[in-house]
Amino acid sequence: MKPPAAGCRFHAGAYVVKCKERDADSILLALHRVQIGCERVTDQTGNRGPMKRYSAFAIAREALRQHTGWGRAWAARTPRRKYDVVIVGAGGHGLATAYYLGRNFGITNVAILEKGWLGGGNTGRNTTIIRSNYLQDPSAAIYEKSRSLYETMSQDLNYNVMFSPRGVIMLAQTQAEVRGYKRTAHANALQGVTTEWIGPDRVKELCPIMNIDGPRYPVLGGLYQARGGTARHDAVAWGYARACSDMGMDVIQQCEVTGVRQTGGKVVGVTTTKGDIDCDKLGLVVAGHSGVLAQMAGFRLPIESVALQALVSEPIKPCMDIVVMANTVHGYMSQSDKGEMVIGGGTDGYNNYTQRGSFHHIEETVRALVETFPMISRLKMLRQWGGIVDVTGDRSPILSKTPVDGVFVNCGWGTGGFKAIPGSGWAMAELMAKGQSPLTDEFSMFRFREGKFIDESVAAGVAH
Amino acid sequence: MLTLHCPYCGVAADETDLHAGGQAHLKREGPDASDDAFEDYLFMRENPKGVHFERWRHVYGCGKWFYAARCTATLEVFGTYPAQTTEPPQDIRDKITAKRPGWAWGAFK
């Protein structure tokens, strides 16, 4: 008898906590969506079985037979010799690309290669914030597409990603930020992204634990996106992996790509630690290691990899049901469903691949937040971690063809990749399948030489 | 915390006393340069997982710019040297070769 995975028990438990805050209709709706454990997609010989949906009925059925019917959520496969498409990187963006290749374009002869474990890179290391209040039109288009896909992701994937549209405020703490965010609010109105400029009183009303009269950086207002929020990051990767596996794609973990093989300027395959794999099209979706993969393929990227870190406090009672970002002082905070205060800050200033943070950055971030949130001054911090983010010159991503025919690259999401996962996958899949996508046109890797920046760093649309 | 030895004032400076200035030994291009060369100079950067050369400024010390040779995979520092040079000095290269045989970075080996 196989017990259900421990992570899934937590999964369901946390969902029940969430349901308590909602009205009766929402709870009924949630009961339709709730799921625990894993489904059986392979039998003992590794053959695929019939699709099993997670549902309240499935829980009841399994409860009656001691939970012996749950199988693996995705199949563990060994690589075949040849695929139509190989995606390098089984993080959120890579898995989402594969998922939409299958769902939107019927391309299912796909392998997703991961050198570590599924979602073990930046997908599992971020602060899970989802928003789309960007200044530039191309950014707003892809991030808003992404945010809207998050709204129905749990239903689309039949996997509870715990999307919580709790609202996001970006605080304005200087006059320059006030002007900047008012401008962004107007731009968002023209782009069809619902955001609003709110005054300090409304900020205090939405987030009562905040001290808006700080001596150094008083809160002058904020850019509020009510439909922004958070989601469970691991579940996003797991949900996509399950859906990909169900479409017949191979998710192959612990398979590191060591070379890109090409003939006459066209990709023919990759060499990996599990042998050579041929492919017609290759997607590089590896975030911090994009430069390393690009070097294997023989081209350079306008990208530098730096460490970004985050930390969480001990769990406390619910005190904050909104996400707050304070870009002037480089700190952002939200409260997870487990009760931990999730805190993020700025990046290190130098190239780094070590996936660990540094104490002086923690000090900087926490010092800034304590002024705005005095109640966190006596909180103990539980743990801290780092991820390697790939940062471009204009702080906007690259979704692009490359100098090598058949090789596509999706990288440069820098410090804001999690929120973009479904939109990025949607757009990247279209780019790989059709050779062109309206969502990715502006994000070409060749935009720099043309001077066509999507300059979100100067626009202060992102925290760095 | 990363600690670099300032080659001018001789102190071991903490990361918080320094300002990172990005890739070292950029080849500056003039008005007659090709588009490719100018794109490289302005936007393309070495981003190795391993041996890397960088510019740093001892901002809360002597205020001067210097170069550092460092490993981005382990944060090990191979050495620092004054900025009045267009390529890494031989003793720094020898130190790197002793620890990372076969290394290469841009035009340097």
Image: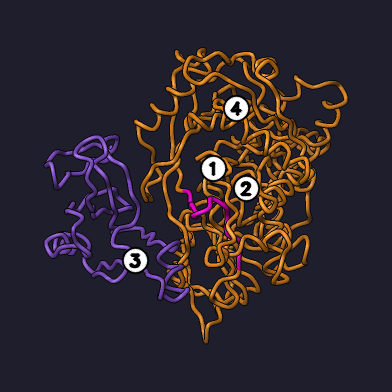
**Chain assignment, label 2:** A
A202 lies above or below B38: above
Image marks 2 and 3: residues in contact by CB distance under 8 Å: no
Residue at image point 42% right, 44% down: A307
**Chain part drawn in magenta:** A389-400
A161 lies above or below A332: below
**Furthest residue in direction right, as rendered:** A25
**Chain assignment, label 4:** A
Location of mark 2 (residue): A237
Q: Residues within 10 Å of mark 1 (few under 14, many from 20)?
A: many
In the rendering, at what x and y percent does residue A98 appear? 67, 60
Sequence-wise, the earlier of marks 4 and 1 is 1
Sequence-wise, the earlier of marks 4 and 2 is 4
Specify whether B39 is left or right of A458. left
Q: Are marks 1 and 3 on the same chain?
A: no
Location of mark 1 (residue): A124
Specify whether A320 is left or right of A66. left
State whether residue A158 appears in this view: no
Location of mark 4 (residue): A171
